[in-house]
Amino acid sequence: MQNKSLLIKRISKTKELYFFLVPAVVFYVLFKYWPIYGLQIAFRDFSPVFGFWKSPWVGLENFRRFFRAADWLRLINNTLGISMTSLIIGFPVPIILALLLHHTASQVFKRTVQMITYAPYFISSVVLVGMLYVLFSPSTGIVNTLLGRLGIGPYFFMGRNEYFVSMYVGSGIWQGAGWSAVVYMAALSGVNPELHESALIDGANKVQRIWHVDIPSILPAIITMFLLQVGHLFSVGFDKVYLMQNPLNLSASEVISTFTYKRGILDGDFSFSTAIGFMESSINFVLLAVFNRVAKLVSGSGLW
């Protein structure tokens, strides 16, 4: 009872601050938690005429339908292929960029590079994909023009299956590396300067100080960012993939999110698409929980 009264007094003293939480709470209740009610259609043969409760219950049939589909394995391979490539190649880039900028002596050069690498983040997916089609056009694109002068090509990069993952991941790194580097720059600003001074006294060069001082100091931030990406490992952003998709690269660009959109929105098979989305989110949650546990055991840091 005493703890309860203390809690009430503490809340009453700062009650104005709790009013600022109201919009966020309302948002999450309306747009995050209330839609969970609709997950039941993944286990029903949903019809808008009958509604949620009167549509026939089919259990796990919608999940079985996905694994009976002829191209289910290709969808998973494409999704994981893009996600894993983005994680393996794209994840270290902002860390390296942040470390290089942190040890740059010229402040003018540092701010210029930050601005150049940070700006692409604000380009929309529609504009970005349009830029890719223009730059890599087989007839007028600057890339094929330069290749032509070397006696190579032209290549229709946006219409070849073997180039799709490279185009997707490469453009993603260009667009997001500067934004992600801000997190690591902020973490590096909190590194104790005395550690570097001690390392200099011991004769450590810049590379050794980066490896033994900077990286261990920002390791919690690295693990947090890594786990956040692992939480989306089984899902690929729909908008960019769908915009880059065309009949020529469909076998490499069809992923779970685009397949779900086509079956759910275009074909009106709401139960089937909901089942796929629910399965996708569940696998992402399991992966996040597993990797978080591993990170806690290895480094002592994690999301929870």
Image: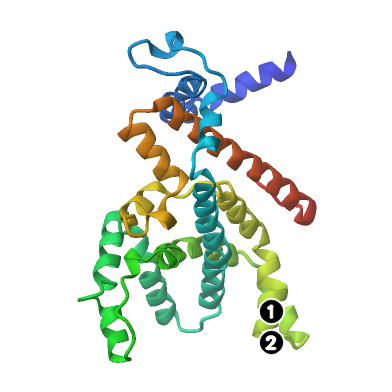
**Helix, strand or loop under label 1:** helix
**Helix, strand or loop under label 2:** loop
Q: In this view, does 97 lie above or below 125?
A: below
Dot label at residue 53: none
Image position, residue 247 (x, y; %): 31, 55
The amino acid pointed to by label 1 is: Arg
Q: In which quarter of the image is the C terminus?
A: top right
The amino acid pointed to by label 2 is: Asn
Q: In this view, does 243 lie above or below 95?
A: above
Dot label at residue 205: 2
Q: Mark 1 = which residue?
A: 209
Determine if residue 192 is in view: no
Characterize the local packing of mark 2: few (<14), some (14-19) or many (20 or more) Cα atoms within 10 angstroms: few
Left or right side of 168 for 159: left
Q: Which one is nearer the viewer's eye here, 62 or 108?
A: 62
**Alpha-carbon span between mark 1 and mark 2:** 6 Å
- Disc 1 vs disc 2: Cβ atoms closer than 8 Å? yes
Determine the residue located farthest toward the bottom in the rendered image: 150
Q: Which one is nearer the viewer's eye here, 285 or 73?
A: 73
